[in-house]
Amino acid sequence: MALSFLLSCSAMLPLLRVSAYNTSAGCAIIRPPKDGGIRYRGLTQEQIRSVQVLPVDYEIEYICRGNRVIVGPKVRKCLPNGTWTDLSQRSRCLLMCPRVWTSLENGRVSSWPLGPPVEGTVLHYSCLPSFILMGRNSTQCNKMGKWDTPKPVCHYDRHYKGKKKLYIGALFPMSGGWPGGQACLPAAQMALDLVNSRTDILPDYELELIHYDSMCDPGEATKLLYDLLYTEPIKIVLMPGCSSVSTLVAEAARMWNLIV
Ligand SMILES: *[C@@H]1O[C@H](CO)[C@@H](O)[C@H](O)[C@H]1NC(C)=O
Ligand SMILES: *[C@@H]1O[C@H](CO)[C@@H](O)[C@H](O)[C@H]1NC(C)=O
Ligand SMILES: *[C@@H]1O[C@H](CO)[C@@H](O)[C@H](O)[C@H]1NC(C)=O
């Protein structure tokens, strides 16, 4: 049954008088997951020991022991028909493997299934162009909460013949009140093509533009700016167009050490 350490948190909440409820309208208690317990809000330890039915709308919360995390519904509520919510989905307390394995410098990691890296999660690794994977290309989180292989690394390939890519992020207003991006984008693309075709400027690199339509809307641009900053590949320069969006990007730039 629930452990006493899980119950101390309920002490400050007002006590429910379970006996005041019509016990034929309610939900029968359910078992906690393995390696976990249930937090019963507002009940004393004595009440928890004797209670068999909990009232409609009552919510229980699962808690896991140690450094396990809950996978599946974390909270269940008693429905008027006497069942708990989401009973078709199991709640389990699983060990989590170190998160360090879930990102890879100069590479990509895909996780299956998605969500926290718990027991059973499989990660697949790959490296960006011009990098070679050293180590295994996949790893699995085992029942001890440990990855079954060391984390691989992406080593720069000295013999890589192709050019190294440099990415430039851009927020051009292609639609909206001032669709000036329709003219800016081809001009920017022509400038990059010119640099890429010359052998005396950045000979070992290729510039690539990743652009989004800001619609000249600072709200829309904020979302896109986050996408540019927090999704691979890393961009070396940001290029905004349209005054209201440029102001926003310029004000945010110093927080991320960005070149605008
Ligand atoms: C308790 O609830 C049931 C079903 O909702 C109802 O039939 C019964 O009359 C109620 N009993 C009392 C004492 O309110
Ligand atoms: C109880 O009600 C919920 C939603 O109101 C429904 O999804 C569920 O199937 C019902 N369960 C039973 C046993 O009637
Ligand atoms: C992962 O490595 C194995 C051999 O270690 C290989 O057979 C497999 O094709 C590789 N998978 C990918 C996606 O590169």
Image (cartoon, grey):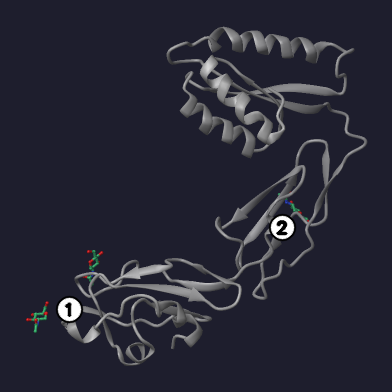
Q: Amino acid at mark 1?
A: Ala
On the picture, is 157 further left or further right than 245? right
Distance in Å between CA atoms under marks 2 and 1: 48 Å
Judging depth in this view, the residue of 232 and 123 nearest the camera is: 232
Q: Is mark 1 within 8 Å of ligand 1?
A: yes
Q: Position of residue 49 (x, y in %)?
A: 36, 92
Residue at the spot 67% in from the left edge and 56% down from the top edge: 123
The residue pinned by badge 1 equals: 25
Q: Quick one: quadrant of the C terminus?
A: top right
Q: Position of residue 5 (x, y in %)?
A: 50, 84
**SS at circle 1:** loop
Residue at the spot 51% in from the left edge and 22% down from the top edge: 214
Residue at the spot 69% in from the left edge and 63% down from the top edge: 98
The residue pinned by badge 2 equals: 101
The number of numbered badges drawn on the structure is 2
Q: Amino acid at mark 2?
A: Trp
